[in-house]
Image: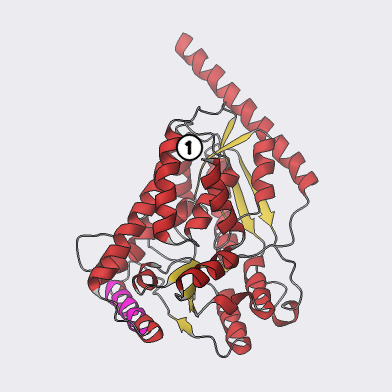
Amino acid sequence: MQNILTKFAQAATRPMDYAKQWKRDTGGRVIGIFPMHFPAELAHAAGALPIVVQEDEEPITIGQSQVFSFYCGYNRSLIDQALRGEFDVLDAILFGDHCVQLLGTADVIRAHLPGKPILFNQLCSILDADWAMEETRATFRQLWLELETLTGTKIDEASVNASIRLFNRNRSLMRRIYDLRRAGETTLSARNMQHIVKSSMVMDKAQHTALLEELVTGLAQAAPKARSVRVFLSGHLCHAPKLSLLDLFEDSGCTVVDDDLYTGYRFIFADIDEAGTAIDGLASWYLTRSQKVPCPTRAVKGLDWEQYLLQAVAQSRAQGLIILMAKFCEPHMFFYPEIKEAFEKNGIPHLLVETEHEGVALESLKTRVDAFVELVGRRSSAEIASRAGATAV
Ligand code: SF4
């Protein structure tokens, strides 16, 4: 099992190195995909390696002059990576427009990498609008054609269906690991969980799936970890939270039992319907995803992130919520007051942690997390005592 986790960790922490090696081995094309809404299945069906482009750990240097300092760390890192030549391995980049900052980043990358094919597609943001289904089908048809032109390969329906089946299998295996976590039946750390999901954004899907099959079998046989304070992690759109943060939560006595992070459950919870046409399956997948795990960059009438979170925290039997918010992430900042209000009203402890590409002061954060763990522990004990009192009466 450790061997598989090491392979996942390597791909997750050095995605561009993985992509270079894959290209050397196969001679195929690598297509960078920007988060969070484009299905990679189409690029895979074209024979390419689709990889979700990740923030890297390097400090922002030559990219600093090209980007506003009030852009989130993910955008600043992308621009810096582009200027450092990290994207040279990519044969094309598939951009979406899910937030204003990403639009600015697309322009900077276009200006600095004029020879790099950029497939820029706009997905409709009001998911339950009357026109949404037809517009989304049209967007994916256009992307399908663009990928055919880029790769010089006809992408047939059967190939897309095969990719959809493979990706669905991959997601379902990761969801199985989430089930084990919620049930407290795995020793996997939050760091390992991130590596598993993040590497699935990067690695050859068949290779990743074969390793996952083996891992899931091994995990189901592993001894469960001793319980500590059960927490749900929420937020951090587009890019992974730093591993040092996840370690700190666990060192302070938290067990992460569930999450809605993009490099987590948000990436894997929804499968594509295999029954109808591929375009219909892709369009429905996109339009219904936010109805299950709401995304603050999309709109669905009457659907609120905070209501989903209250329910998800209860279902996973988490005792508290830790919100990871990337600094200057406007879509997230917009929703936070409502999440805060809902959790306070329901008496569920939550902790807001603002993150930055440059890192956070771990010592002061540790004090806050320790206090949060103590609060959660006391509240849980008080609730158990009050329930016992009520039963006695
Ligand atoms: S993390 Fe937030 S601000 Fe940054 S690209 Fe994603 S949605 Fe936009």
Question: Per the image, is 293 magenta?
Answer: no
Question: Per the image, is 140 magenta?
Answer: yes
Q: Is residue 284 visible?
A: no
x and y percentages locating residue 250 in the rendered image: 64, 38
Q: Is residue 76 visible?
A: yes
SS under mark 1: helix
Q: Residue at x 48, y 33 (%)?
A: 317
The span shown in magenta is 133-146
Q: Is residue 173 above or below residue 252?
A: below
x and y percentages locating residue 152 in the rendered image: 36, 85
In the image, what residue type sits under mark 1?
A: Arg
Q: Which residue is mark 1?
A: 181
Q: Nearer the viewer, residue 69 or 114?
A: 114
- The figure's colour scheme reads secondary structure
Classify residue 170 as left or right of residue 345. Answer: left
Q: Residue at x 67, y 66 (%)?
A: 73
Q: Residue furthest front?
A: 25
The image quarter in which residue 146 lies? bottom left
In this rendering, the count of numbered labels is: 1
How many residues crowd mark 1 within 10 Å: few (<14), some (14–19), many (20+)?
many
Figure quarter occupied by ligand 1: bottom right
Q: Is residue 216 above or below residue 32?
A: above
Q: Residue furthest top?
A: 392
Q: Residue at x 23, y 69 (%)?
A: 158
x and y percentages locating residue 103 in the rendered image: 55, 79
